Amino acid sequence: RWKEALGALRAARAAGTRLNVFVFGAAITAMARSGRWSEGVALLDDMAADGLQANVVAYNAGIAACARAGRWQEAVALLERMDAAGVAPDKYSFASAMNACARAGHAERCLELLREMARRGVVPDEVGYGTAIAACSAGGQWEQAVKLLEEMRNIGVLPNEASYCNGVCYNAAINACTKAAAWEEANRLLEEMSARGLAPNERSYNAVMDACRRGSDGGAAALQQLDRMKARGVAPSLRAYTAAIEACGGGDAQRWQRGMGLLEEMRKAGAAPDTRAYMAAIGACAAHRKWRRAVQLLEEMREAGVPPDRPCYARAIQACATQSKWERAVSILVDMADRGVPPDEGCYVEAIRACRGAGVVREAQRLQEVLDELRAARQQRDADADAYRRGGDGARQALRSGAAEQEEEGAPALATAAAAAAAGGAA
């Protein structure tokens, strides 16, 4: 009801009614809750025009309005304005301005405000630190995020007790480590959470497992975290299972078998595998040279009502190439085209590798010709796109017409060439 509040306030001012800071503060809060940041800031100006000194509550409402609207520069400007007016910012003032900076991706400015709080003797709480850690996470500054978490412990802001805010701070730091594939540090933070009485939740485990499967040596750790997750009564999500299956792309044959078993475990747990989960499983098959199982998984996907996408097909072709199963690789290429999933350059590269590995030079050459056409078409599209960016309206219209004709005529030609390559191999 921000319109009613603003209308009533303006009517009262027009009638000469003397309003106090509390009335203005309530109106600014209404603007903040409605996302009307500019109206909220304008009311602060109206207060000054009426000879009223805005208090910390009014300024905080204005900063919050700017933060909610993503106006980080205006939020910081209001923080500076209140200081210049002799109104000392409190932890809520800083927290709102920091939140605005964090949401806008300005981690450094957010950290500067955190340090400014300390210089002023305003002790940040879990919310302030959590905002700064989240900003570091978004900015890829995982070491700084972990450092802030340590700082919280050292000054007693992170007590040895379970709380929602403490869990959020840990999860934000773990997410920062995940984005940097710092899986060992993510693992350590997860165990530290448990040691401090903070029960890791599904998000905590998901983030750590993502970090592990991204790391060069973290596959075994990802599977260990899946086991710990289940042992602690946290039901693994689809994301957790998928990360664990992706981790099975490395290691020995026993790990690959574990990955295949996880697909069945997912089904029994009610987390039906999606395209990404199947893609991870097929990728594990390719990594372990298990071409038959990779091809079977494509069929299982269709039976489960999960249509394979291009990355799934590509990994299956790659699996065939590891054992030089060229006939199967080419048949997958044809099947892709028949099902409306045009093979990309990578698919042809792997199929050619399968042919060459089997010593079938003729078929490899036919596929190479198709690949060359694909590359030429891509180069032409890139050139057209560059010309489109630099050309005028007339040139752009001509390029659009040419691109449409090329798409209509080129796609069937490539499909025919692929089929010819397959037919030639079968002959």
Image: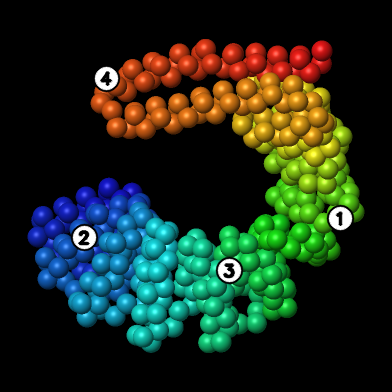
* Residue at the spot 74% in from the left edge and 50% down from the top edge: 246
Q: Is residue 312 above or below residue 187?
A: above
In primary-sequence order, the first of circles 4 and 1 is 1
Give the residue at mark 1: 252
Q: Which residue is mark 4?
A: 394
The residue labelled by disc 3 is 173
Q: In front here: 423 or 115?
A: 423
What secondary structure is marked by label 4? helix
Taking the spot 58% from the left edge, 60% from the top edge, the residue there is 179
- Under tag 2, what secondary structure? helix
Task: Tell which tag, 2 or 1, sits nearer the viewer.
Answer: 1
Within 10 Å of disc 3 (Cα), the crowding (few <14, some 14-19, many 20+) is many
**The one of 171 and 321 positioned closer to us in this rendering:** 321
Residues at marks 2 and 4 touching, judged by CB atoms closer than 8 Å: no
Badge 1 marks a residue whose secondary structure is loop
Q: Looking at the rendering, which quadrant does residue 197 occupy?
A: bottom right
Image location (x, y in percent) of residue 222: 76, 60
Disc number placed over residue 43 in the picture, else none: 2
Instruction: Please name the amino acid that badge 3 sits on.
Output: Ala
**Residue 374 seen by the camera:** yes
| Dot 3: element | helix
Q: Quadrant of the C terminus?
A: top right
Q: x and y percent of residue 104 in the render? A: 39, 58
From the viewer's perspective, is 286 left or right of 109?
right
The answer to whether residue 225 is seen in the rendering is no
Q: Earlier in the sequence, mark 3 or mark 1?
A: 3
